[in-house]
């Protein structure tokens, strides 16, 4: 498997990054996990405008789905003819949400996307075995475990600490985990993780490598988040960047 970070900014685009979007490839199949604000630009820069075979949207907060709206134009109005409908795995409200955001007057987007609702469990997407489970976040949100050829990747999506994330992350080679908050701040409960909490989950789950993402550049501190994670996890840690790519 190969993971390429298209966007990693938390909650709104940062000065140097689009919002959440991760391209995961195996056997030539390209799964885009989340499609946040500005990441359509990064998709073209780091992969290609149509370099997507399926999409998985972890939840319907706009910073994780907004460019799936712009992408309707790319697929529907391609100069050489409409591109085939893409499978989109997402919470049940996705078709209405994306269609309404695209246009109030032009109907649905089923010509562009074939939607599949998510629920906790395992299923295949292309060459991947995908396992999703509900996270601790105010809207229906799924953490994701992707397995291929004996290797495993877990992506937390957005979440506060929860047992389901610990299960998904168990023993993965690479744990891509959000770290939106700073310890000691007046953080709302049941929403996001701190670097320390990400590190604690990484240690409990015995992951190989911890990648921190979804930092909010304007409100946080990379140095503090990294150090907090390092106090709780002794393995390799990185804060991800747009364009960074990891062989798993
Ligand atoms: Zn969210």
Image (cartoon, helix red, strand yellow):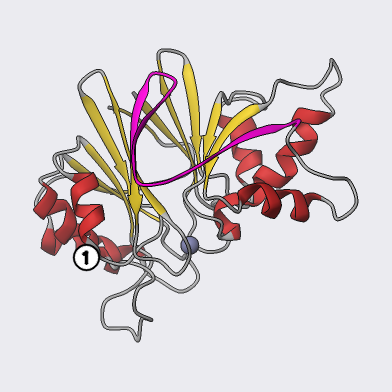
Query: What is the quadrant of the N terminus in the image?
Result: top left
Residue 103, position as x, y percentages in the image: 84, 51
Does the Cβ of the disc 1 residue fall within 8 Å of ligand 1?
no
Q: Quadrant of residue 187?
A: bottom left
Tell me, yes or no, if residue 12 can be seen here: yes
Q: Residue at 56% across / 50% down in the picture?
A: 92
At x 33%, y 62%, the residue is: 179
User: Between 216 and 95, which is closer to the camera in this rendering?
Assistant: 95
Q: What is the x, y in percent for residue 25?
A: 43, 23
Please provide the residue range marked out in magenta.
111-131
Rendered residue at 35%/86% (across/down): 186
Q: Count neighbours of disc 1 (C-alpha within 10 A) and say few if under 14, some if 14 to 19, many if 20 or more.
A: many
Res. 68 image quadrant: top right
Question: Does 150 appear in magenta?
Answer: no
Residue at 58% in and 26% down: 52
Quarter assignment of residue 40: top right
Judge from the rendering whether residue 11 lies leftward or rightward of residue 76; answer left or right.
left
Q: Residue furthest bottom?
A: 186
Residue at which label 1 appears: 197
Where is residue 104? Give x, y as percent. Answer: 86, 55
Asked whether 121 falls inside the magenta stretch, the response is yes
């Amino acid at each position: 498997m190969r993971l390429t970070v298209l966007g990693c900014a938390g909650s709104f685009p940062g000065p140097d990054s689009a919002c959440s979007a991760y391209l995961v490839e195996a056997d030539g199949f390209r799964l885009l996990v989340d499609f946040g604000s500005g990441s359509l630009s990064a998709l073209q820069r780091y992969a290609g405008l149509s370099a997507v075979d399926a999409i998985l949207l972890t939840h319907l907060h706009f910073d994780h789905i907004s460019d799936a709206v712009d992408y309707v134009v790319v697929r529907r109005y391609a100069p050489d003819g409409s591109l085939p409908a893409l499978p989109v795995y997402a919470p049940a409200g996705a078709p209405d949400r994306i269609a309404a955001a695209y246009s109030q007057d032009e109907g649905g987007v089923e010509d562009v996307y074939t939607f599949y609702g998510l629920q906790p469990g395992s299923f295949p997407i292309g060459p991947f075995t995908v396992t999703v489970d509900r996270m601790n976040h105010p809207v229906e949100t799924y953490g994701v475990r992707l397995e291929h050829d004996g290797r495993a990747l877990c992506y937390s999506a957005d979440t506060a600490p929860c047992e389901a994330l610990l299960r998904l992350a168990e023993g993965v080679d690479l744990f891509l985990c959000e770290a939106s908050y700073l310890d000691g701040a007046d953080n709302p409960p049941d929403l996001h993780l701190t670097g320390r909490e990400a590190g604690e989950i990484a240690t409990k789950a015995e992951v190989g490598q911890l990648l921190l993402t979804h930092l909010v550049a304007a409100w946080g501190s990379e140095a503090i988040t990294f150090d907090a994670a390092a106090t709780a996890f002794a393995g390799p840690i990185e804060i991800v960047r747009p364009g960074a790519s990891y062989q798993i």
